[in-house]
Amino acid sequence: MQLENPAIVAFILRRIALSLVTLVLLSLMVFFGGQVLPGNVGRAILGPFADEASVQALNQSLGLDRPYIVQYWDWISNFVQGDMGMSYAFRSPVAPFVLDALANSCKLALVAFLIVVPLGILGGIVAALNVNRPIDRIISLGGLSVTVLPEFVTGIVLILIFSIWLDWLPVTATWPEGAGLGTQLYHLILPSLPLFLVLFGYIARMARAGMVEALDSDYTRTAVLKGLSWPTVIRRHVLRNALLPTITVIATQTGYLIGGLVVVETLFRYQGIGSLIYTAARGKDFPMLEAGILTIGVVFALATLAADLAYTLLNPRIRLGAET
Amino acid sequence: MSALDSAAEERSPLRELIAALGRSRTFLVGAAILLFWIFCALFGEFIVPYDPLADDIINSLLPPSAEHWFGTDQLGRDVFSRVIVGSRDILTVAPLATVLATVLGTTLGLITGYFRGLVDDIVSRIIEAFMAIPVVIVALLAIVALGPSTLTVITVIGLAFSPIIARTVRSAVLAERELDYVAAAKLRRENALYIMFGEILPNVLPPILVEATVRLGYAIFAVATLSFMGFGIQPPSPDWGLSVSTNYGMIGGGFWWTVLFDSLAIATLVVGVNLIADGVAGTLDD
């Protein structure tokens, strides 16, 4: 890679700076939403019948009587060092809960990605090779129709079909303690399907668009005219150029995936970061909620950053050429 | 009809748009679905066989039958009546959120696109950063902090969607501001506010219209999801997402009719609005 190229270095630095701005903005929103807007936290924990003195004492012991700017700095600098605060509900550090949940969510997301990426790309390729034929219509229209459906809607229908009527797959995603990889996978198939349905349409559409463009290009015509066989043309010239944009789209979909995880994990009662956020939100456990959201923000920022950098390094001409 | 009349008719862009939409099958199917649900929202309560909110414990959890077409839920309420009337709240909240997002986003986009320079740089970076945050998460946090209410949901979704519309409007404005009519307005010493809203805005309406219909689909998605999670439309509304949320715990007992019909209702509405968006986009692109 030509890392010495100053334009690329400048672009990468700019891109990293943008991620940092996003994270700072998110942390401010999380702080504002979690610690400023709710008002009197001591009162919220102790309930309406506690006397004023104990409410104030609790606020003081939680450090909530200090100026907001001090509280923010304290919170964010601790967070960066791995101390995510104390849960109101469990009266214990938040970090282990968040990290466990994150690991579980990663398993679910990984299963979903492993199913959707090959199938989505394959769907796009098949559609592109049959442009405007019935099979293309089915893949494109079908993919787009399920993409727009909320995950809990597809989730409910899938549960009804595969768990209740056919009795093939378990209703909940939680496997028995100490279950092996096979059992874990078996429990994760159904929850990953709603995520699959949301992502399939996007990925197939991008792969299809990239393929159609590549098939239409001069280099493909040249390859055909110089006598290469059609499979060789597809493999060597079309696929290579078509799949690069698809890879970026896949990485940017982590945002949708994370939003979807909150819903899917709630629906399937899976102990991931989405259901952690949901439970914390219902119980007004603000330290847990803040830590969960900020962790997701960090993961998301890293994923999109990695996607953008990979895309730039693989194909500097496109990104830097389009830069104004 | 005289030649003059037909010439005037051909030139009216609005009539042309409506005529073109009338030829788009995608748009017509979507519009029919949406109109059906709007009709149910407005007049559903007069045509349904039962009161959608009335409990009837003795007849709870009955499967679909001639009396209760979609069965009854755990409180004995008629599911068919609830599904028909359940379109009302989501069809109020989601469009209002979309209008708010469109107004805010258009204003932001006009300002950043027209003035460019430092204002544009700062606002654009903030918009970019904001767009990198999943909407459901932002909405969840804000609603928990403010307490769930219809007004909160509208405001939060409206705010969360406005940057996306702002970006679309900005790029349209960037192209328009270089055109002669803007230069002419500047020469006439019109003030910036008039140039932005009186001169440029009418010319960037088509992309705004497309973006707004697309956003309406996402707003319905978001409101339904938030209601399902208990942070959107609140009881005792017969809202679909809310009904699924209260009934899906019993799904293991085989009471499929308490969740299936509400889910399908959401699905048809979302798909309908997306078909409209596709139809509008396709028509304006040609």
Image (tube, rainbow, N blue to C red):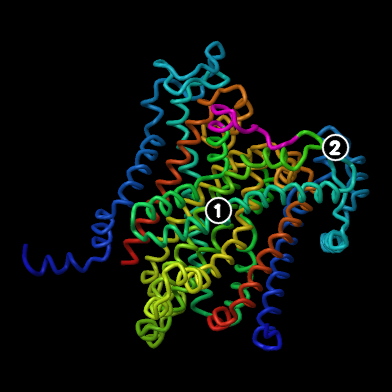
Query: Residue sitting at 52 percent across and 53 percent down?
Result: A200
Residue type for callout 1? Leu
Q: Position of residue B210 (x, y in %)?
A: 41, 61
For mark 1, what is the residue? A199
Q: Which of the two residues, B266 or A164, is positioned nearer the viewer here?
A: A164
- Residue B196, position in %: x, y? 44, 74
Tell me if residue B140 comes above or below residue B163 in the rendering: above
Q: Is residue A205 above or below residue A267?
A: below
Q: Mark 2: which secondary structure?
A: helix
The answer to whether residue B148 shows anywhere in this view is: no
N-terminal label among 1 and 2: 2
**Mark 1 crowd level (few <14, some 14–19, many ≥20, 10 Å Cα):** many
- Residue under circle 2? A46
Residue B20 among those drawn in magenta: no
Residue at the location (37% across, 53% down)?
A137
Secondary element type, mark 1: helix
Q: Give the quarter of the image for residue A297.
A: bottom right
Cβ atoms at labels 1 and 2 below 8 Å apart = no
Residue B115 left/right relative to A138: right
Mark pair 1, 2: CA separation? 43 Å
Which image quarter: residue A303? bottom right
Q: Which residues are magenta?
A: A160-175
Q: Amino acid at mark 2?
A: Leu
Taking depth in this image into account, of B160 and B194 the one nearest to the observer is B160
